[in-house]
Image (cartoon, rainbow, N blue to C red):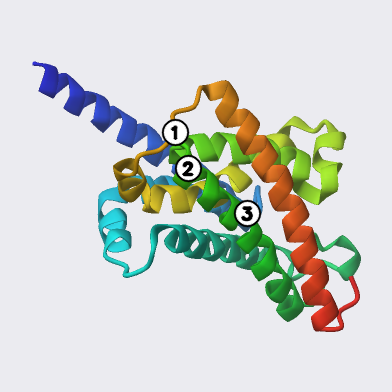
Amino acid sequence: MKTIMENKGLFLKQILIIIVSSIPVFLVLTDNTSLSLTIASIYGYSWLIKNLLQRLSDNTPLPLKLKFILWGTISGMLLEILAIIDNLNLPDSEKVLLNKDTNIDLYLALGFYFAFAFIWSFLANKYDYTSGNIFIISGLCGIFIKQSGAIFASFNLIAWIYVFFVYGSCQALPGLLVENQLKDKIRIRLSWGKKFLYGFCGQTISFIFASMIIYTLAKIGEIQL
């Protein structure tokens, strides 16, 4: 009886995830939101096939921390590509990118998302963070970080929800892919309060680290920020 109830609960959870994950796709198709929000759909659909994705990740011959950084950077670059597509037809004055030039934007974004993946790889390897924890913490912190605080200062609830799902999904994806290996590690257990505190500090450090990397890359490439 217990197994039947568990299977029923899992089935209902999967149906709910399919419905929620399909909302961004529907909104894009009806031209009611930007393509960037579909990163949340990618995260949701990835959860549905996580066993397959985790096996593929487990078989990738790289150290765990390096895998986390790699998947995190790739996830970030995927989000940046979606953002570039969103901004293609906008005038330069309205583009919300690291740089108006697409090639330069991708160059700088590589360093930006590497910084966040690097810090999360350290936290997730040391403490018992789950992909869900990373999603919530990154999403909430993203509201404060996005556009250097302009999103938070707008007090626009729709914008807050949008950023929460975009940033949360993007940064939680690598945690989902390496979840099996993280569970096998002996990690320090934290209360939810400490998880959020450490995560918030990690996000702040990531933002500072990312800014330093972008500044360095700009100097190397002689790019005007």
In the picture shown, does residue 223 fall above or below 152? below
Contact between marks 3 and 1 (CB within 8 A): the answer is no
Q: Which callout, 3 or 2, points to the residue nearer the camera? A: 2
Q: What is the number of callouts on the image?
A: 3
Mark 3 is surrounded, within 10 Å at the Cα level, by few (under 14), some (14 to 19) or many (20 or more) other residues, namely: many
**Whole-percent x, y for residue 81 in the image:** 62, 68
State whether residue 190 appears in this view.
yes
Residue 5 x/y as whole percent: 17, 19
The answer to whether 8 is drawn above or below residue 88 in the figure is: above
Residue 79, image x, y percentages: 60, 60
Q: Which residue is mark 2?
A: 126
Q: Which residue occupies the foreground of this view, 96 or 89?
A: 96
What residue does disc 3 label?
116
User: Which label number is shown at residue 188?
Assistant: 1
Of mark 2 and mark 1, the one earlier in the sequence is 2
Give how far apart the Cα atoms at labels 3 and 2 are: 16 Å
| SS at circle 2 | helix
Are the two marked residues, 2 and 1, in contact with CB atoms closer than 8 angstroms? Answer: yes
Q: Quadrant of residue 106?
A: bottom right
